[in-house]
Image (tube, rainbow, N blue to C red):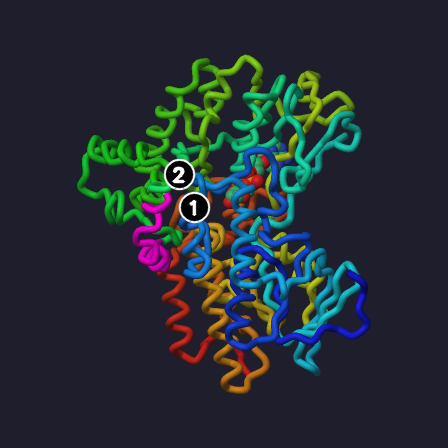
Amino acid sequence: MSASAAPEQLDALIVGAGFSGLYQLYRLRQRGFKVKIYEAAPALGGVWYWNCYPGARCDTYGPLYQFSIEEVWKDWDFDELYPSWEKIRQYFEHADHKLKLSQDIRYNTRVNNARFDEASCRWQVETENGHSASAQFLVLCTGIGSKPHTPDIAGLDTFGGRCLHTARWPQEGVDLKGQRIGVLGTGATGVQVIQEAGPVAAHITVFQRTPNMALPMRQRQLDEAGKRALKVDIKDKYAKRARTRAGYDFDYLDYAGPTCAGMSDAEIRARWESHWQEGGFVPWLGNFPEIYVDERINLMAYEFWRDKVRQRITDPLMAEKLAPTQAPHPYGVKRISLEQRFYEVFNQPNVTLVDLNETPLVRVTHAGVETVGGRVHELDLLVLATGFDMVTGGLTAMNITSADGITLRQQWQHGVSAYMGTMTHGFPNMLFVYGPQAPSGLSNGPSCSELQGDEIVGLLAWMRERGMRRIESSAEADSAWRKRIDDFAAGTLFGRAQSWYMANSIPGKTAQMINYPIGMPDYLEQWREVKAADYRGFDLR
Ligand code: NA7
């Protein structure tokens, strides 16, 4: 792309071509807005462009991991219940073909700077490749996992082998066969890499800080009948997303019931047994709501999980590391991952588990990773499955400056306050979807992208109908929104784990509940109330 002299004039500039950005493009264009997406990658798909590491796959089952737009879903099927990154990329190409998205996307165009100009009431935007735009609205759709986190580890640059972050995996792939591989991190990504590399690597050394309370995925291949079965009632499934806490087509009401009060422990465990056979997120999102607030029920849930997992691990010492007797943190308040053969990998003779709490990492050397006591784990490939500066990182990575010269980074240096999870005071006409203080990380991604996205499209169309040009959340509304979230979270067990939900897994980040934890129905109810009061909390002109 060559630098163009005059700024591109737009009604709305969207940053990011993942689910939320593409949905905004499609819906705003339908409403007659002149709109473009600027996307850093050379293709659409958001995280699914960058995260092409071996085994990368979605933890949401296929029918719910799509747009609810009939034109797109009616002739699309995934070939597995939980689709791989390769298939999700093909899905985005299909959506592009159907909705003609790419004609309004500038690829290889990373937004560097954006500044609000009060006089024109427009955002002035510059990109890394020298392009510029002037837009009335800046709609940020950078997703929750677009800024990879590389920990500050001594000697990382001295490593003689290859070191790769999973979110910057080479597009041409990497042959893991016969290699001595180290994997740092056992989050959703680490689990997937480890179970993929296990069968082919010469040796794997897993560096674990916190055990993952992973659940059985119960993956299956889909034949034609299986694909057809998943399409039955699909419209009802999409409609139901607005009525469940996490934007899925099931909830605790479908599996556990509204409460476990009055049930014996044996009855509760019997219910969990059937959840376990169901697999996927059912033992988590389909569980009794008490698991988030009641320490006794939560501990029972942990012990149920622990005992199930330990049955699959032959070495008792290994079992104690992966599923400890004492819960490392409450069950379900840190992102649970789905696994297919993760625990069996640790029964292989070529797998070493290093407990970083027992033997902390000292440095990376030319040969590998050195832990306390001088032991060097020799490696050919070091995989950093160390995650992201989740939820806010993609937003604060851009130099976004308010009319008063305050950057978004400065604005949020002591934590985020963002009314309706959509705007922050001082940054007029800048809206974000599937970002901080919206359901986001506590919701299925496409569900939040669409349901919150519809509210934003509706808001911008409402303004246009009334000839309004400027919107800004009030400082009071921002603070009240943050308080609502903080107060709710304080009554739960979320604060008892270090996690990206609580924004405290990245050194230096202000600890706070960073998503909207009260559930999708409540979030949408807040929108209904705000709309009924002519968008109360927003200053509109
Ligand atoms: P996560 O879930 O943030 O996991 C990162 C992992 O890396 C986790 O196990 C961390 O341990 C570990 N980590 C991070 N920094 C370090 C250091 N300095 N030393 C040792 N270990 C470290 O990222 P993922 O990529 O797996 O998943 C992100 C989301 O993408 C996921 O939740 C889904 O929503 C999709 P910790 O647990 O903090 O002790």
Q: Quadrant of the N terminus?
A: bottom right
Q: Residue 540 location in percent, x, y? A: 53, 81
C-alpha distance separating marks 2 and 1: 11 Å
Q: Main secondary structure of the magenta part?
A: helix
Relative placement, left or right, of 418 versus 77 is right
Q: Residue at x 68, y 37 (%)?
A: 172
Which secondary structure lies at badge 2?
loop
Report the span colored magenta: 227-244
Q: According to the image, label 1 marks what residue? A: 62
Label 2 neighbour load within 10 Å: few <14, some 14-19, many 20+: some
> Compared to 372, does 24 lie above or below?
below
Q: Quadrant of residue 219?
A: top left
Q: Residue at x 53, y 54 (%)?
A: 94
Residue 404 visible to an observer of this rendering: no
User: Considering only order in the chain, which callout, 1 or 2, is on the residue closer to the N terminus?
Assistant: 1
Q: Is residue 482 visible?
A: yes
Q: Report the side of 143 relative to 277 (left or right).
A: right
Q: Is residue 290 left or right of residue 207?
A: left
Check the image and report above or below for 236 versus 31: above
Label 2, on which residue?
Answer: 222
Q: Is residue 320 above or below residue 292?
A: above
Amino acid type, callout 2: Leu
Asked which secondary structure carries label 1, the reply is helix
Instruction: Give the position of the C terminus as an image quadrant.
Output: bottom right
Contact flag, marks 2 and 1 (Cβ < 8 Å): yes
Mark 1 Cα-neighbour bin, 10 Å: few <14, some 14–19, many ≥20: some
